[in-house]
Image: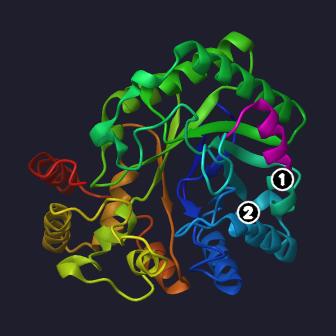
């Protein structure tokens, strides 16, 4: 497994990350520990989690459980220096905290995550989504930033970065990153840190896949010019690109089925649109034409972008993870990449 450095931080991580958001809900302790063992054996040492995990659904009583699963794994296996851990503080949420985060709250949440993870440092600490609002999670279709207060936002950034600076100086975190951020927001976080002489943003965790390519323009330009690494979540479009939902199917135990069981709509957070099956069918046909597994092709695509990108792969079971790991080092040909570009133009933003 290749390794990459997060921005200019000096923090080296595996070029693929293991996502853990189902640990403690769809994935039990034994399976979660087995997955982390498998990933580490395959050279994937970079684990991504968050204080609000597990998800699907997010429940107040389960907040922090995924970090506890990882902490138990670290305690039983040892070798903290063999893995890199990324976690996140939640933005405004009825299930975590309504106010989201500020400098005071960060000082508490960092310590809480350290306790649950049973470690004395976090390699990458991220802001799960902006307090001012975000166009992530399909909010881009009706995004309205007019209620934002520029000076209030900049003051908030300075307050948060002050707490991050303290945590870095204390050795509690090694690097600072964002999630579900925009080009304007990322640039202002960077400007604010530089003005304060504080730790700079080294990464941004945004959704990115064959079917979700909002990152390709303004964010990509910021990332290249400011040395920010993309951590691409949902590289399989929440499971759509596996093909398991084609024809209206909804396998038992799948993300959509579990969501529906808990009173949700089973629409994968708005991803199951009328055009989504068309896009999935097209990408599957392309993979079949070139003798590729569509799952492996989808993940490989994210690793061959013109900007630094680390896909976050996740699975609810060891069998699913085993399948993904078999193609984790796939490199797509120029012809396949050209054909993907054509499909993207033909079926842009299917959700």
Helix, strand or loop for the magenta stretch, by majority? helix
| Residue that protrudes farthest toward the bottom in the picture | 252
Q: Which residue is mark 1?
A: 112
Question: Is residue 97 shown above or below 221?
Answer: below
Q: Give whichever of discs 1 and 2 has the lower sequence position.
A: 2
Q: Position of residue 125 (x, y in %)?
A: 70, 43
Find residue 304 and report its horizontal and vertical position in percent.
Answer: 36, 48
**Given contact means CB atoms under 8 Å apart, are the residues at marks 1 and 2 in contact?**
yes
180 above or below 94? above
Residue 29 vertical position relative to residue 44 in the rendered view, above or below: below
Residue at 71% x, 82% y: name it. 29
The numbered mark at residue 64 is: 2
Number of marks: 2
User: Can residue 305 be spotted in the picture?
Assistant: no
Q: Residue at x 40, y 26 (%)?
A: 145
The x, y position of residue 324, in whole percent, is 44, 74
Circle 1 packing at 10 Å, graded few (<14), some (14-19), many (20+), is: some
Question: Do we see residue 12 in this rendering?
Answer: yes
Instruction: Name the colouring of the figure.
Output: rainbow
- Magenta-colored span: 100-111
Residues at marks 1 and 2, CA–CA distance in whole angstroms = 9 Å
Which quadrant of the view contains residue 251?
A: bottom left
Find out whether residue 34 is within the magenta segment.
no
- Picture quadrant where residue 188 is located: top right
Position of 35 with respect to 110 (left or right) is left
Picture quadrant where residue 144 is located: top left
Q: Position of residue 216 (x, y in %)?
A: 32, 37
């Amino acid at each position: 497994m290749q390794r990459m450095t997060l921005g200019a931080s000096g923090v080296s991580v595996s070029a693929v990350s293991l996502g853990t958001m189902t640990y403690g809900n769809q994935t039990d302790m034994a399976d979660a520990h087995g997955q982390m063992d498998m990933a580490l054996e395959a050279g994937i040492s970079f684990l991504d989690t968050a204080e609000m995990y597990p998800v699907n659904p997010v429940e107040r009583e389960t907040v922090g459980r995924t970090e506890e699963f990882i902490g138990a794994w670290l305690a039983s296996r040892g070798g903290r220096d063999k893995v890199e851990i990324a976690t996140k503080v939640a933005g405004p949420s009825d299930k975590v905290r309504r106010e989201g985060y500020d400098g005071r709250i960060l000082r508490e949440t960092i310590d809480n995550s350290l306790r649950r993870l049973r470690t004395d440092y976090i390699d990458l600490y991220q802001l799960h989504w902006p307090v001012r609002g975000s166009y992530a999670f399909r909010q881009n279709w009706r995004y309205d930033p007019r209620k934002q207060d520029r000076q209030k936002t900049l003051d908030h950034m300075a307050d948060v970065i002050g707490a991050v600076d303290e945590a870095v100086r204390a050795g509690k975190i090694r690097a600072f990153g964002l999630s579900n951020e925009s080009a304007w927001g990322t640039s202002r976080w960077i400007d604010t840190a530089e003005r304060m002489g504080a730790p700079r943003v080294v990464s941004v965790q945004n959704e990115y896949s064959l079917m979700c390519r909002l990152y390709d323009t303004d964010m990509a330009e910021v990332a290249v010019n400011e040395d920010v690494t993309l951590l691409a979540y949902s590289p399989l479009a929440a499971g759509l690109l596996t093909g398991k939902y084609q024809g209206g199917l909804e396998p038992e135990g799948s993300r959509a089925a579990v969501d529906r069981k808990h009173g949700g709509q089973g629409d994968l957070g708005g991803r199951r649109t009328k055009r989504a099956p068309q896009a999935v069918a097209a990408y599957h046909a392309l993979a079949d034409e070139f003798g590729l597994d569509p799952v492996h092709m989808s993940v490989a695509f994210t690793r061959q972008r013109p900007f630094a990108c680390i896909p976050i792969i996740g699975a609810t079971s060891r069998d699913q993870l085993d399948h993904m790991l078999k193609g984790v080092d796939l490199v797509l040909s120029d012809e396949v990449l050209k054909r993907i570009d054509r499909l993207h133009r033909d079926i842009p933003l299917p959700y």
